[in-house]
């Protein structure tokens, strides 16, 4: 087993070199990150070709809207009764934006509309799942208290007993 003895001066020099390497790496990383275009969640910016895609990649506000839309779409796919129809609508809407939107105002309005549409789709999907769950519980012949317990476990508020005093 070898033990290397480093003198006090050498140890100070080694720490200084390590610190300088760390600082240099941090500075270079920051410069590299700042020089790259923004990365929108739903597509790689380096391949953007349309005016609307370039706007999304260059503008932080539009990039955030794109992130939100991508997250909502992912959630809507989970709840959609017809995934193929949802995907066809996504492609149709995206194609429209690609052809029509040449400025930031148009792209913002498009995102606001699409986000509202997907929120409505998600709400409808959630309501459909709740109705399906309630129908399945009824078909199982569970007592009302057991049905309410299952609904509560699933995060669905059981109907309140308005008739009881």
Image (spheres, rainbow, N blue to C red):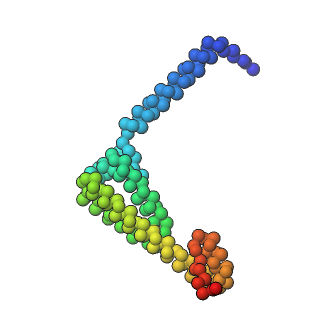
Q: Position of residue 157 (x, y in %)?
A: 58, 74
Which image quadrant is residue 132 in? Answer: bottom right
For the question of whether residue 92 can be seen, the reply is: yes
Residue 105 vertical placement versus 151 (above, below): above
Residue at 42% across, 66% down: 119
Q: Nearer the viewer, residue 120 or 85?
A: 120
Q: Position of residue 51 (x, y in %)?
A: 27, 51
For the question of whether residue 142 can be seen, the reply is: no
Q: Indicate the quadrant containing the N terminus: top left, top right, bottom left or bottom right.
A: top right
Q: Position of residue 71 (x, y in %)?
A: 45, 58
Residue at 39% across, 37% down: 34
Q: Indicate the quadrant containing the C terminus: top left, top right, bottom left or bottom right.
A: bottom right
Left or right of 40 on screen, residue 146: right
Residue 123 vertical placement versus 55 (above, below): below
Residue at 73% across, 18% down: 2
Residue 142 vertical placement versus 102 (above, below): below
Residue at 27% across, 55% down: 105
Query: As drawn, which residue projects farthest toward the right?
Result: 1
Left or right of 50 on screen, residue 61: right
Q: Nearer the viewer, residue 104 or 1?
A: 104
């Amino acid at each position: 087993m070898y033990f290397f003895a480093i003198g006090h001066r050498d140890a100070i020099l080694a720490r200084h070199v390590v610190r300088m390497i760390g600082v240099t790496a941090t500075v270079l990383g920051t410069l590299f990150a700042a020089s790259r275009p923004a990365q929108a969640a739903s597509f790689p910016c380096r391949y953007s070709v349309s005016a609307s895609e370039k706007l999304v990649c260059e503008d932080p506000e539009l990039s955030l809207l794109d992130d939100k839309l991508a997250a909502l779409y992912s959630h809507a796919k989970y709840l959609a009764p017809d995934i193929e129809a949802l995907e066809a609508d996504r492609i149709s809407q995206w194609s429209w934006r690609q052809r029509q939107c040449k400025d930031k105002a148009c792209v913002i309005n498009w995102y606001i509309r699409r986000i509202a549409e997907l929120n409505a789709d998600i709400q409808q999907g959630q309501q459909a799942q709740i109705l399906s769950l309630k129908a399945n519980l009824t078909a199982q012949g569970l007592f009302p208290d057991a049905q309410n317990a299952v609904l509560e476990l699933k995060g669905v508020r059981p109907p309140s007993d308005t008739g009881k005093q």
